[in-house]
Amino acid sequence: MINVAIDGPSGAGKSSIAKQIASKLGYVYVDTGALYRTVGLAAVRSGFDPKDSGKVVPMLDFIKVELRYVDGEQRVFLNGEDVSEDIRLPEVSMAASGVSAIPEVRAFLFDLQRNIAAESNCLMDGRDIGTVVLPNADVKIFLTASPEVRAERRQKQLKEKGIDEPYENILSDIIKRDYDDSHRETAPLKQAEDAVLVVTDNLDFDGSVQAVIDIIKEKTQARQEQQ
Ligand code: DC
């Protein structure tokens, strides 16, 4: 199986870029942020502080998180309910970041991610895919952009879904999440030593897709030649 790990901060365009590449290459696209968002949503719905491990850890015994692919598109289920839309709300983003710092939550979602990678050629995006989940991935990419560029893109995305969120709020959320995600003790967001860095500030969508495809082709060809 060919496994491609794409890590980077929120709003760098990982999911739209990875989704497009997966469909071009015929790979399965796995959005691991959706899994943390689902646990975050469960905490929000229960009225728990997402950072309160004393509340969140026992909750894990009562929740089932599943990924299913409907017409090639990833959908995420919480106890059998399709929550793929609900997990995109801004308050759930913060909650996802909160629960993701809890080691038991990371362990809870680990096998799910590993199993998909073992079974399929996949492009998996997240924060710790190249460093922790798939340390032996065939290709590792660290995709990023400045916080300002990411905030602009996120605002546009939300607007398309009919959600009007002020730019300043989005930017401060991004800066806070970047800080929290890269300073947590367990599996912090960081570039794997063997990951290729791609900065998309000056690349449009198609340019970013092409840059990543070029890296995948180069790395997988090198691997095939070695065999
Ligand atoms: O990629 P995203 O914005 O949907 O991710 C939501 C949160 O989940 C993010 O703040 C960090 C966390 N996350 C993580 O810790 N590890 C991953 N592999 C993916 C996401």
Image (spheres, grey):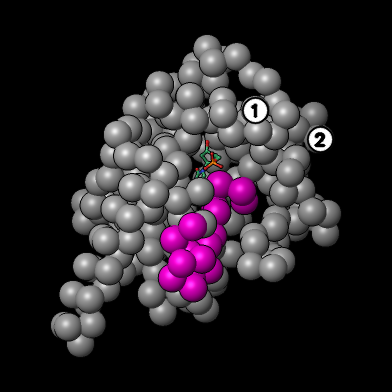
Image quadrant in which the C terminus is located: bottom left
Residue located 64% across and 42% down the image = 37
Q: Is residue 127 left or right of residue 146?
A: right
Residue 132 visible somewhere in the drawing: no
Q: Is residue 75 above or below residue 10?
A: below
Q: Secondary structure at mark 2?
A: helix
Amino acid residing under circle 2: Ser
- Asked if residue 162 is among those painted magenta in the image, a careful observer would answer no
Q: Is mark 1 within 8 Å of ligand 1?
A: no
Count of labels in the image: 2
Q: Is residue 193 above or below residue 178?
A: below
Q: Which residues are magenta?
A: 20-35
Q: Is residue 191 left or right of residue 48?
A: left
Residue 66 picture location, percent across and down:
70, 61
Q: Nearer the viewer, mark 1 or mark 2?
A: 1
Residue located 46% across and 67% down the image = 24
| Mark closer to the chain start, 1 or 2 | 2
Q: Which residue is mark 1?
A: 159
Distance CA(mark 1)–CA(mark 2): 28 Å
Residue 16 picture location, percent across and down:
51, 48
Viewer-closest of 194 and 201: 201
Q: Secondary structure at mark 1?
A: helix
Residue 210 visible somewhere in the drawing: yes
Q: Answer few, some or many: residues within 10 Å of disc 2's Cα (few below 14, many 20 plus, some between 14 and 19).
A: few
Viewer-closest of 5 and 161: 161
Q: Which residue is mark 2?
A: 46
Q: Which mark is residue 111?
A: none
Residue located 52% across and 12% down the image = 168
